[in-house]
Image (cartoon, grey):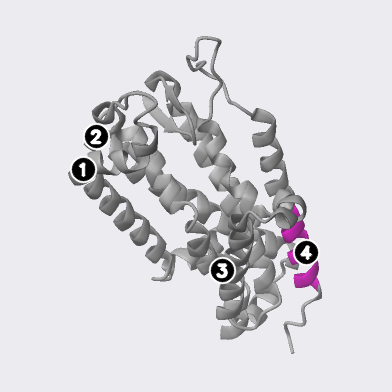
Amino acid sequence: MFASILYIELFKIFRRPRTYIAFGAIALIVLLVQFALRVNGTEFIHFFTDSQADTFEIPEQQILNGYFVCVAILHLILIHVPLLVALIAGDMIAGEAQTGTLRMLAAQPTSRTTLLLAKFSASTVYVILLLLWMALFALFGSLLLFGQEDLVVFRETDLHIISQHDVLWRFIGAFIYAALALTMIASMALFLSVYAENALGPIVATVCIVIVFTIIQQLKVPVFEQTINPWSFTTHMLGWKGFFYVEKNAEGVTIDGSIENPMALLKSGIILVGYTLFFVSLSVIGYRKKDILC
């Protein structure tokens, strides 16, 4: 029963033209970034390494490879993907309430909890497919265009060189982590959708919440750093970067297979999962109490 409902919900998602806006936008942005780096990649690297050029020699030509380009794309895109997720997840309940089809669903011999969980699962599948699409263009496309070399990761006063044989699993981990973060956004949008009667409201509300907490995080004000930011979902959504921060040995050589702060990465993942369960639970409670037939 659940599988058939999930199939129906996925069919609803992918029959809407708006669903493909996200896929088209990601492909376009990735291709534009790749084109720009192909033409002016050296200048791009020089811009970000100018402050470190006096400290050590920067091998600019070696740095510009597929792995480096993919990391640059992830920095540019992942912060905006929640807006694309909200476009779909925020419409799951409120959109059907607006068109009147929610009453028809309520008349079916299926519990509201099962229906709500199917809608959440469909949103999760959408998130995963979106990230796989991004990986296809950002990672594999960049490797085809720029080749494969060691990955150079810049820090504020240092740089880490990760062996090309130690990189792929880090990207897999980063994309899985991004799936956790975006699934959390989908659960929040679904929660807001339960309490709305039109599709636009929860979509705009989700976008506004993400923007507000992102601004709070970027202000770097001590009162926010000590109270809000440690528990803000926008803080932990950036945890995917931790897969590319590695440890060094006494000689300053990066250690293959290492992660600089695995406990912080684990903590951020747990917090995101906790937020997801919280919003899904509230969505189930709200949907079961929602007066649909009036």
Residue 70 sits in which quadrant? top left
| Range of residues picked out in magenta | 277-288
**Which element type, helix, strand or loop, lies under badge 3?**
helix
Mark 1 and mark 4: span between their CA atoms? 47 Å
Task: Name which residue type carries label 1.
Answer: Arg
Identify the residue at image location x=23%, y=38%.
Answer: 42
Q: Secondary structure at mark 4?
A: helix
- The quarter of the image holding the N terminus is bottom right
Task: Report the Cα–Cα distance between label 2 and label 4.
Answer: 46 Å
Residue at the spot x=42%, y=70% of the render? 18
Q: Which residue is mark 4?
A: 282
Residue 257 in the image: x percent, y percent? 53, 19
| Residue 80 visible from this viewpoint | yes
The x and y percentages for residue 284 are: 76, 64
Tell me where residue 254 appears, x and y as whole percent. Answer: 49, 17
- Quickly name the residue at label 1: 38
Residue 240 picture quarter: top right
Give the number of the disc on residue 90.
Answer: none
Q: Which residue is mark 3?
A: 207
Q: Is residue 211 above or below residue 107?
A: above
Which residue position holds label 2? Answer: 146
**Is the residue under label 2 in contact with that under label 1 (CB below 8 Å)?**
yes
Reply yes or no: does residue 3 show up in magenta. no
Mark 4: which amino acid? Leu
- Label 1 or label 2, whichever lies nearer to me, is 1
Cα–Cα span, label 2 and label 3: 34 Å
- Of circles 2 and 4, which is in front? 2
